[in-house]
Image (spheres, rainbow, N blue to C red):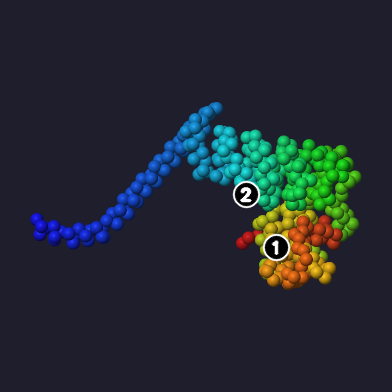
Amino acid sequence: MRVGLVLLSPLARFMIRYFLPTFLIACLSLVDACADEIDEATRAKDARRVKALLRLENPQLSEDAKGSVLRYLQTKKGTDEYLSIVAKFQLKEAKDELVRLAVEDADGTLGVDAVRLLMKLGQQEYLAMALADKDDAAATKLAAALGLLSDHNTNSLLLPLVPSEKSVGLRAAAVTALGRNLPGQKELLALVQAEKLPADLSFSAANALLTSSDAHIKAEAGKHLKLPATADAKPLPPVAELVKQSGNIEEGRKVYATVGTCAKCHKVKGEGKEVGPDLSEIGSKLGKEALYVSILDPSAGISHNFETHLLLLEDGTSVSGILISQTEQEVSVKTAEAIVRKIPRDEITAMKKQPVSLMPADLQKSLTAKNLIDVVEFLTTLKKP
Ligand code: HEC
């Protein structure tokens, strides 16, 4: 017996050292696989349950059933099915995801359907909070989606933004959104008539009101607002009319490089100076309407990282440009002439981010409407490969 044990023990030790870990790992993965299986099973059960519930006329969800539906929804984010299930069961729990979707797809059907659903679910207050608290870029998109809904019930959410301290971009988006329904246009007109419309919103307000289908609104607005004149002294047509036209791409390419002066500040496929964003793929980023607004009202949609900074210097002069870098010793800005200026910190008395774009707001002065239509046509062809 003893001899047997003595003989066995090296073998046992060998087994313990080499096979036990392998055995344990195998056990663990088995447990894991079982857990996955449970997950799969739950998922299948959830899917069956949701399907059955969807067939009911007026489904009342028990807590347990609601759990199934919410779990099922987690796998359907960003789809039409997600929206229709939320609508069917009136799931307020989905409000965060709906706002996220509205921001992500602000000018698409899904995004607009998401805000429609939020309104239906009585989430006005939540939307007002999102408009107030989200960062400017996200809030601007949310306002745009609300505008595309063309529902006058959204006006009370948008109107307070107009005279607020928010960025021009967000305020202009609110004006455009209000302009998409008649009661909203009336609210805007009242602001204009009372001379309470901030001056930096007159371009977006003119575009909204001078194209009104209501002759009275159009005429009244015309007394206070007008679109800027173009190179041939004719007033610029409203953006809503410009977008309906198609231009000549080759002519547009020429305008871009010559009278438009665009190449002085933008690169396309490696050519041109780089003050503003590279436009090589701008046709994939912006639609026609957004392109017109970017050109004609640049301050309404200042792209991130391209804000103008104004530096006041000790000698009483000032420099403005796009911030390139800053260290403890110096600040570098690129001016509208594409010149990089490096300024020692101790010469700077103040530095302020400006609400206006470095892109000139009066480019249309040297362009005809046709030039503009052509240049936009050209820009729409600049797409991601
Ligand atoms: C003096 C420099 C300057 C000139 C000239 C200029 N731009 Fe710009 N542009 C900028 C700057 C800076 C920005 C970024 C800030 C902003 O969005 O307003 C910009 C932004 C844009 C945008 C938005 C880009 C984006 O990614 O959102 C478009 C489109 C555009 N410019 C087109 C044009 C066209 C077309 C012309 C000529 C008709 C032109 N620009 C002339 C400086 C300029």
Q: Which residue is mark 2?
A: 104
| x 64%, y 45%: residue | 102
Q: Position of residue 115 (x, y in %)?
A: 65, 41
Residue type pointed to by label 2: Glu
Nearest the viewer among 258 and 75 is: 75
Q: In this figure, what is the number of numbered marks?
A: 2
Task: Please tell me how crowded label 1 is: few (under 14), some (14-19), or many (20+) other residues with Cα within 10 Å.
Answer: some
| Left/right of residue 84 with respect to residue 15 in the rendered view | right
Vertical position of residue 17 compared to residue 195: above or below: below
Residue type pointed to by label 1: Pro
| Quarter of the image where ligand 1 sits | bottom right
Q: Residues at badges 1 and 2 in contact (C-beta under 8 Å)?
A: no
| Left/right of residue 360 with respect to residue 126 in the rendered view | right
| x 63%, y 60%: residue | 384
Give me the C-alpha separation between circle 1 and circle 2: 21 Å
Which mark sits nearer the N-terminus, 1 or 2?
2
Task: Please tell me how crowded label 2 is: few (under 14), some (14-19), or many (20+) other residues with Cα within 10 Å.
Answer: some
Q: Which mark is residue 379?
A: none
Secondary structure type for disc 1? loop
Nearest the viewer among 134 and 362 is: 134
| x 71%, y 61%: residue | 306
The quadrant holding residue 324 is: bottom right
Q: Position of residue 190 (x, y in %)?
A: 84, 40
| Disc 1 C-beta below 8 A from ligand 1 | yes
Quadrant location of the C terminus? bottom right
The quadrant holding residue 301 is: bottom right
Secondary structure type for disc 2? helix
Q: Position of residue 41 (x, y in %)?
A: 40, 40
The quadrant holding residue 303 is: bottom right
Q: Which mark is residue 277?
A: 1
